[in-house]
């Protein structure tokens, strides 16, 4: 079981290459990578926890010989810290998602406001168009009446002209 866990931070004045470095609560191997919690599979130390180079046993990558046995308290501390770090990371992810959702909500509110303004504009235009159509329909009706009256007038004018021609 290869779980990445971090150890507590304590500044080290030892600079020898035989001791691991500690940076921001992480134990680093000699490759300057975060050391990985591993569990022994040997009969003598079966399931005993230790820290080792994270590149060990990974697809022919070169690795250093960093190795440190851990006791139960150190493992528990590492597991708790890793769990806390995992939760903090998830909290940051949730905060980013929340921020993104808030931005999207603002964008959607702006779109809704624009759509409401367009709806009001179209509603006003629809009322104006309907009023114009009513005026237009009334004018068409008036023109039809006038056309009918003109035909009647022309008919009577024709009849009158015929009468004058025939009887005078």
Image (cartoon, helix red, strand yellow):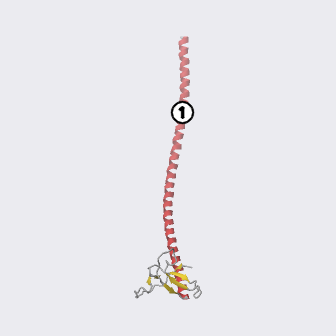
Determine crowd level at label 1: few under 14, some 14-19, many 20+ residues with C-alpha closer than 10 A: few
Q: Which residue is mark 1?
A: 142
Residue 49's place in the image compared with 134, above or below, is below
Looking at this view, is 47 or 101 the one in front? Answer: 47
- Quarter assignment of residue 141: top right
**Closer to the camera, 120 or 74?**
74
Q: How many marks?
A: 1
Identified at 49% across, 54% down, the residue is 117
Residue 146, image x, y percentages: 53, 29
Name the one closer to the observer, 24 or 168. 24
The structure residue drawn at horizontal position 53% and vertical position 85%, both measured from the top left corner, is: 50
| Position above or below: 96 against 68 | above
| Residue located at (54% from left, 23% from top) | 153
The residue sitting at the front extreme is 60
Helix or strand or loop: what does disc 1 sit on?
A: helix
User: Which quadrant is the N terminus positioned in?
Assistant: bottom right
Give coordinates of residue 13: x percent, y percent. 40, 88
Viewer-side residue, 89 vs 58: 58
Residue 148: % across, % down: 56, 27
């Amino acid at each position: 079981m290869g779980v990445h866990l971090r150890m507590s931070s304590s500044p080290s004045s030892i600079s020898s290459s035989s001791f691991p470095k500690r940076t921001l609560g992480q134990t680093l191997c000699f490759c300057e990578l975060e050391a990985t919690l591993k569990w022994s599979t040997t009969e003598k130390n079966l399931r005993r926890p230790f820290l080792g180079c994270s590149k060990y046993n990974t697809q022919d990558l070169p690795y250093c010989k960093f190795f440190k046995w851990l006791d139960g308290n150190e493992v528990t501390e590492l597991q708790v810290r890793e769990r806390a770090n995992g939760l903090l990371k998830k909290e940051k992810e949730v905060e980013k998602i929340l921020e993104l959702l808030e931005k999207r909500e603002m964008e959607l509110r702006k779109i809704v406001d624009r759509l409401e303004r367009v709806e009001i504009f179209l509603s006003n235009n629809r009322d104006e168009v309907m009023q114009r159509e009513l005026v237009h329909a009334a004018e068409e009706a008036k023109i039809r009446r006038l056309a009918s009256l003109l035909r009647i007038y022309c008919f009577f004018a024709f009849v009158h002209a015929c009468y004058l021609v025939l009887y005078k």
